[in-house]
Image: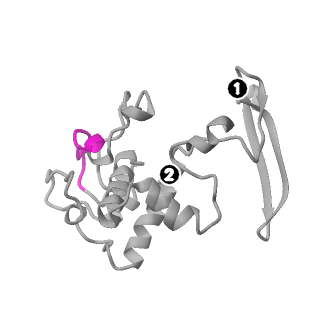
Amino acid sequence: EMKREGIPGAAFVFVRHGRIVYERGYGLANVSTRRAVDPERTIWRIGSISKTFTATAVMQLVDRGLVHREADVNLYLSKVKVPETYPLPVTVTDLLTHTAGFDEIRPGTQASSRDSVLPLAQFLAPRLVRVRPPGQTISYSTYGMTLAGDLVEEVSGKPIEEYLAENIWRPLGMSRSSINVPASSSGDV
């Protein structure tokens, strides 16, 4: 199936009752060097799984009474604001349920290098375009969840990756989870 789909490598880990029962790597982690997948060392890009962690972080702030789900997100933001295109504001719940009504991602939004990654608010400022009223239509929203990440940064006072590491990954024992590959793991890519 991997060959048919053009997938160079994958890992499988079966966990039962909190214990690893079976783990195995398949194919290549690095096609050019022909390095095999090692389920304990191969680094996989976090991609859109970051949305799950971001939503968890927002809900932690809700649980702590620092954020209210039905509040206008602009109450928590100072570096970037949601435009007042429609009478109803975008709420925290709208961000988490992909009902904020933002335009969706366009080509050319990935940074060419780690050094060229923009701060979340600066990245979002020209991209927060409201194309429909909030709370009405579910539409997968990269910008909405990115704005939720900016909200986490503003409310917690920490960069999103630092917040996730301190409040989610470390407490869960996820010692190799990150948004950016740390220098200590750069040989594992």
Which quarter of the image is occupied by the C terminus?
Answer: top right
Give the left or right position of residue 161, taking residue 72 as reference: right
User: x%, y% of residue 82?
Assistant: 20, 53
126 is within the stretch colored magenta? yes
User: x%, y% of residue 56?
Assistant: 48, 65
Residue beneath label 1, please?
Answer: 6
Give the left or right position of residue 12, taking residue 134 as reference: right
In the rendered view, tell whether residue 25 sits above or below residue 29. Answer: below
Give the left or right position of residue 138, taking residue 13 as reference: left
Q: How many marks?
A: 2
Specify the amino acid type for callout 1: Gly
The label shown at residue 98 is none
Callout 1 crowding tier (Cα within 10 Å): few <14, some 14–19, many ≥20: few
Specify the amino acid type for callout 2: Ser
Residue beneath label 2, please?
Answer: 50
Callout 2 crowding tier (Cα within 10 Å): few <14, some 14–19, many ≥20: some
Q: Which of 106/172 is in front?
A: 172
95 is within the stretch colored magenta? no
Can residue 137 be seen here? The reply is: no
Dividing the picture into quadrants, the one containing residue 108 is top left
| Tag in front: 2 or 1 | 2
Dividing the picture into quadrants, the one containing residue 2 is top right
User: x%, y% of residue 151?
Assistant: 31, 60
Q: Residue at x 26, y 57 (%)?
A: 134
User: x%, y% of residue 186?
Assistant: 61, 37
